[in-house]
Image (spheres, grey):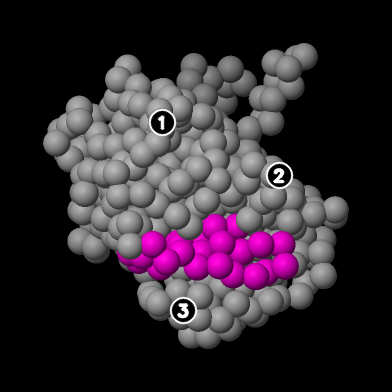
Amino acid sequence: MAFSKAPTQDTYSSPRVSLFREITLRDGGQSGKDEDYLNVYFALVKDGKTGDQRRFIVKRSGSSSIINSVGATSIRGMHFGTDSNKLFYCVSNDVYVYNVATAVTTTLSNVFSTTTGDVGFTEFLYDDGTVKMVASDGTATTGIITIDSSNTVATANDVDLPAHDPNIVFLDGYLFVAESNSSRIYNSENNNPLSFTADAWISPEQEPDQVVRLAKINNYIIAFGSTSIEYYWDAANAAPDSPLQRNDTPIKINSYLGGFAIYGNSIFFIGANANGQPDLFELKDFKLEPLGNPSISRYLSADTDNIDQWHGAIMAIGGHVFYVVNAGSNKTWAVDLDTKMVTRFAYKTNSIFDVTHTTNIFNASSTRTYFALDGDSAIYRFDETLYQDSGTNFTCKVVTENNDFGTLNRKTMSRMTIIGDRPSANSNLSVEISDNDYQSFTTARDLNLNQDLPCLRQLGSFRQRIFRFTYSDNYPMRIQDVEVDINKGTS
């Protein structure tokens, strides 16, 4: 048959492999199948004038140690005082005060009677304009301290102070605490966070549940209960009664499970809806919305670790802000608060990024997220100029969906090309292929990104194909697309 320059059907094409996708784990990630994005995030670049949009997969920033460890134990709580420019954190029963400007640490020894468990911090404004740091380990009578500008400690000694959740809240000259195993919210005397009155409390009444944590949004105290969320405002009731009054309108039916983090006017947490299904939630002002996706919900349902080990934190990296969740020992989820897209983070060569506390530090030269890790009393910070964690390379991984490119007919792939930024030196991206629904992958092939056309050739035949890309070099990485040259068969 004579060759025709105008064939009736062109079987060759150069499609793009979709990389900008929601993680979809059919079994909550138990089998290791389906899409995956590790130590990367999605960047969406928009041009408001032309309507142009570009999407990239970007390697997260690295981190380094900024404050040395003071013992082989975890940090119990931390808080940055913006006006004082001091970072307060607790290890064992000591509180450490790190002056960001001078990099000098002051140790306040034996300020608490306990050595484990959470410690909460908040700033307290007195009526004369003085601001002191207040900290609590939740112990009755003596569990609250104040720290003044000279780092002098004063300790409560009040039999009316109950055992309480250490996450204390300041509002309008009062300190509020949630009594342990109770539905009562106690308040201190006005202008005195170390003094309490036996009758100065209020109790939620809409649902028969206990208060497990307090928080604040704008001028509201938020009471998280075991089955509900209630709002309180300062009604200026006369002492000895509580100054608070409940706002009945925005009450939510939702169980608080853990993972608390606050950013601006939003509170993020792991909760359970009325049907008992766990998920990630965002409480913004009076609005409560799910934040996660079905994959995270399935993962949380299958997790067998203790719920009290679920942590949440806010991380600011590379112009993006993430709600990071450690639930269980297998995965750390990172939700981009701008795009709402979900990826995973892992620290160094670990399988998770077990961050327990974070705070944003502001100084004359930069704004960075400082963080603490479980089982470690050092404090670390993210740095957009680094692409290692404390000198250790970490691995980025992208696993694509199962692609059939529009037909289940057998196809051949002659070339696969990475479209992205070129590193300043030779640097390899590892490429693996699976043609059997994630059951096995080919031997990895290295692709040098430092060239005009970073590609691999002679990639064989398939019906459906999955790519697994791995990158561990100490360089930035930004990938826009993956282009493939394929020829579609007829059967």
Q: Nearer the viewer, mark 1 or mark 3?
A: 1
| 155 inside magenta stretch | yes
Task: Please provide percent x and percent y for residue 395.
Answer: 55, 65
Task: Please provide percent x and percent y for residue 413.
Answer: 50, 45
Q: Residue at x 41, y 31 (%)?
A: 238
Q: Nearer the viewer, mark 2 or mark 3?
A: 2
Q: Residue at x 75, y 14 (%)?
A: 50
Q: Residue at x 74, y 56 (%)?
A: 84
Task: Please provide percent x and percent y for residue 399.
Answer: 45, 51
Q: Amino acid at mark 1?
A: Ala
The residue carrying mark 2 is: 129
Please provide the residue range marked out in magenta: 133-158
Q: Secondary structure at mark 3?
A: loop
How many residues crowd mark 2 within 10 Å: few (<14), some (14–19), many (20+)? few
Residue 238 is marked as: 1
How many residues crowd mark 3 within 10 Å: few (<14), some (14–19), many (20+)? many
Q: In the drawing, does residue 140 fall left or right of residue 314?
A: left
Task: Please provide percent x and percent y for residue 115.
Answer: 40, 78
| Gap between marks 1 and 2 measured at Cα | 23 Å
Residue 92 is marked as: 3
Please state which of residues 463 and 449 is positioned toward the viewer in this rendering.
449
| Gap between marks 1 and 3 measured at Cα | 39 Å
Q: Nearer the viewer, mark 1 or mark 2?
A: 1
